[in-house]
Amino acid sequence: MFIPLSIFALFAFFAVKRIGGRLWQRERQEDMKRFRGLEKTPRPDGEALMANIRRRGTPRRVHHLELFQDAEIADAIAERFDLAAGLSPDDPDYARKKHIAVQRFCGFDYAGAALVRLDFTTFRTTVDDTAALKRTGGRAFQDEHKGPIATWEDFEKFPWPDPCAPEATQDLEWFQENLPDDMCVIARGTGHIAEYLTWLMGYETLCYALYDRRDLVAALAARLQKFYVASLERMLQFDRVKAIFASDDMGFKTGLLLSPADMREFVLPGHRLLAEMTHRAGRPYLLHACGNLRDIIDDLVDAVKIDAKHSFEDTIEDVCEAKRTYGRKIALLGGIDVDFLCRSDEKAIRRRVRRTLEACMPGGGYCLGTGNTVANYIPLDHYLAMVDEGRLYGE
């Protein structure tokens, strides 16, 4: 009896699909045995997260917080644990819905959102990405020698994005209406004052300008402040936004990118104004700032009045040490060092998570997370071990 080849192909297709499905289910079951904490039903509580950040007593459970996960990490988690099941990639809100699914799965009490289509023109160099979860477009690095603004003429003709554009709030508008009631929004993408001083001028050019064109540096700092004030005003219009997460890298391993005096003249006044606006609206002002900030940490805590600090690197400061000093005044976020996460084994990661929680959770004011961001070069299982141990803590 002759059977058309197409029928054989059809049988083979369904057989492979069935075997593949069984293998995926087996891998999922093994993952759940290995990561028992991730098997727990997510129970987000945005109000409890805010109470913890405001240091209103030891929280009932661990709260997780990140500046962001690289898209490659979030996509890998969604694929591995089938978090996008039932979602259609053709849905215009697919990315937002998947973001919520991944956030809930990882134990977050919030969705992260920002104003959109407000990119600045800067000079960058792109190279191939060597991470296991490779970034398709490569990895970009800022040009540290020069930027688009070196003269007054450059400053006057620079194409500033418009934070008042109607479409800028489209993500915030969607989350305002569609975010589950047990979650809140943490708005990010503001306060990049020190960063854009160095990126728009180029760090080398900025250093020269601090000597012979300080008026141009002052004008650029004032223009950046104006931009972020307008941006923040729009963010604060949404009542689902319960905290502002500013981001502004200010230093490197051993010190600040600018002198303490220049930081106080050009950078910190902008953050003080943004913090004042945030506080008047009844929200906490969180700050991500990489680098060794020992020369201005008192300014940030007592003058700027940040409510929480994020970004900790072991070669600069252990978050457990910070808990015993300025961590008595503000919340501390993250602190599981990124290099440690990359190089350590799962047992060591779990031990460190427990040690950190034991030191930092009492009294409130601590959220578990990486020392910086969930970069795509962190081995996925290492990140999941950190999250899982946080979900198990207190059992």
Image: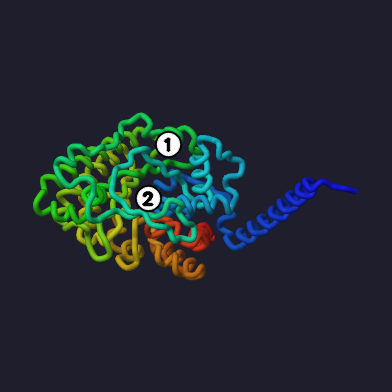
Of the residues shown, which amino acid type is indicated by label 1?
Answer: Asp
- Left or right for 118, reference 128: left
Q: Amino acid at mark 2?
A: Ile
Nearer to us in this view, 29 or 153: 153
Q: Residues within 10 Å of mark 2 (few under 14, many from 20)?
A: many
Label 2 and label 1: CA atoms lie apart by: 24 Å
Q: Identify the secondary structure beneath mark 2.
A: helix
| Circle 1 residue | 171
Q: Residue furthest left?
A: 212
User: In the rendered view, would you say 227 is above or below 332?
Assistant: above
> Where residue 37 sits in the image (x, y, percent)?
56, 58
Residue 50 place in picture, x, y as percent: 40, 46
Residue matched to label 2: 53
Front one among 257 and 51: 257
Residue 176: which quarter of the image? Answer: top left
Q: Nearer the viewer, mark 2 or mark 1?
A: 1
